[in-house]
Image (tube, rainbow, N blue to C red):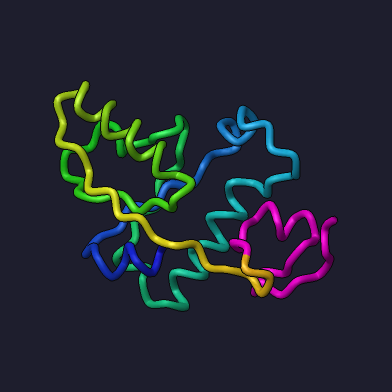
Amino acid sequence: MLSEAFKLGDVVLIGVTNDQLVATLHKKHQVRSFSSRVRDLDRFLKTRRWSQRARINALREPYGPAASQKRLQALIVSKGTLPSGRRLNRLRQQNGLQPLDLVVVDLTKAADGKPISTTRIRNGEIDPQGRVLKTLL
């Protein structure tokens, strides 16, 4: 998703869910702290030389600044998050803003053909590179 965002945008706004919002999401696994997730994101952005073009924002509500910032043009979504993108665009229109272009990207697949996700990594199914660690029945 980030690769596509940096291909398309000169400046990329990246939302990272803050600890208070994470607590409302009822995740089945532990989520690392906001500060550690931002630190790792910043390290990743530096390895790709994207840091200067990135703007990291703490998400305190589900749509963050995307619901109210005029200057945004596009939102990168997956097939699974496309409905949320559509809801965001309805909210933007209610706020008198132009809808964002919704750019749908395929998620990177693990060796088993299923998407790589933090949940799967935390559950011990795969490692961060998508190698299968255990098979679920």
Kindly indicate the quadrant of the structure image that contains residue 105: bottom left
The chief SS type of the magenta part is: loop
Q: Is residue 121 magenta?
A: yes
Residue 135, relative to residue 119: is it above or below? below
* Mark count: 0
Q: Nearer the viewer, residue 75 or 58?
A: 75
Query: Which of the image's four quarters has the C terminus?
Result: bottom right
Q: Is residue 96 magenta?
A: no
Residue drawn at x 28%, y 49% is 102
Asked whether, in this view, residue 6 is left or right of residue 25, the answer is left
Asked whether, in this view, residue 66 is left or right of residue 37, the answer is left
Point out the stretch of residues depicted in magenta.
114-137
In the rendering, at what x and y percent does residue 108 appear? 52, 67
In the rendering, at what x and y percent does residue 40 appear? 57, 63
Query: Which of the image's four quarters has the N terminus?
Result: bottom left
Residue 65, relative to residue 102: is it above or below? above
Residue drawn at x 61%, y 27% is 24
Residue 28, relative to residue 116: is it above or below? above
Residue 36, relative to residue 20: is it above or below? below
In the rendering, at what x and y percent does residue 110 appear? 63, 70
Kindly indicate the quadrant of the structure image that contains residue 82: top left
Residue drawn at x 44%, y 73% is 46
Asked whether, in this view, residue 121 is left or right of residue 79, the answer is right
Kindly indicate the quadrant of the structure image that contains residue 121: bottom right
In the rendering, at what x and y percent does residue 78 appear? 43, 53
Residue drawn at x 45%, y 38% is 59
Q: Residue furthest front?
A: 137
